[in-house]
Image (tube, rainbow, N blue to C red):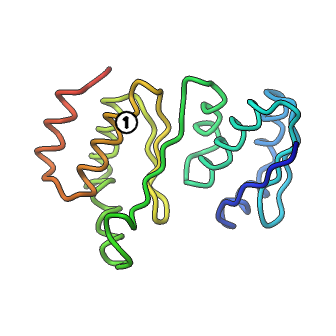
Amino acid sequence: MIEYVSIPQERIRSLRKDDRWKQQLSKLVDAKITFDEDVCIECDDPLLMIRLIEVVKAFGRGFDFNDSLSLLDESYRLEIIDIKEFAGKSKNRQSILRSRVIGREGTIKKTIEKRFGVKVAVYGKTVAVICKDVDSEKTMDSIVMILSGSKFGTVTRFLREHQTL
């Protein structure tokens, strides 16, 4: 079984520079991964293929490779929010919303990660989250609140009330 996954070229270039990820992945799973314009995954196990596609997508959305590997565990999932849904085509508004999710000196992003035990990546026109199924809904709710323009105090209160750690 062969699948192709599209990720940004700059992320593919960073994979080409460092071959350690390929060695690490081959130790963990029985699959072959190559890349040209897209990432090509060859794997006989369909369930493992689904997990590997998620790993590659997560890396493409800005996570480091080790964080992406957590998606090999079935209890983790990848959630992606398109910022354009909240900002329209305005590049300026998209930039403002990216900044809102990150917060001054990364405070909002770090707070969400700490409160829910998740990883958040803001890359391009997306906000991506690696989380356990139980943390998914509240994490996504908090990010949607920020993207929808809720005041930071409201979001912070929400995070305190729904803390899982």
* Image quarter of the N terminus: top right
Q: Position of residue 94 (x, y in %)?
A: 35, 70
Judge from the rendering whether residue 136 lies leftward or rightward of residue 143; answer left or right: right
Judge from the rendering whether residue 98 lies leftward or rightward of residue 150; answer left or right: right
Asked which secondary structure carries label 1, the reply is helix
Q: Quadrant of residue 53?
A: top right
Mark 1: give few (<14), some (14-19) or many (20+) Cα within 10 Å. Answer: some
Q: Position of residue 51 (x, y in %)?
A: 68, 35
The residue identified by callout 1 is 113
Q: Position of residue 71 (x, y in %)?
A: 61, 33
Q: Quadrant of residue 50?
A: top right
- Say which residue appears at 12% left-offset and 44% top-offset: 154
Figure label count? 1
Q: Position of residue 28 (x, y in %)?
A: 79, 27
* Image quarter of the C terminus: top left
For the residue pair 154 and 11, the one nearer the viewer reads as 154
- Say which residue appears at 27% left-offset and 54% top-offset: 103
- Say which residue appears at 29% left-offset and 50% top-offset: 144
- Say which residue appears at 25% left-offset and 55% top-offset: 104
For the residue pair 102 and 138, the one nearer the viewer reads as 138
Say what amino acid the circle numbered 1 marks.
Glu
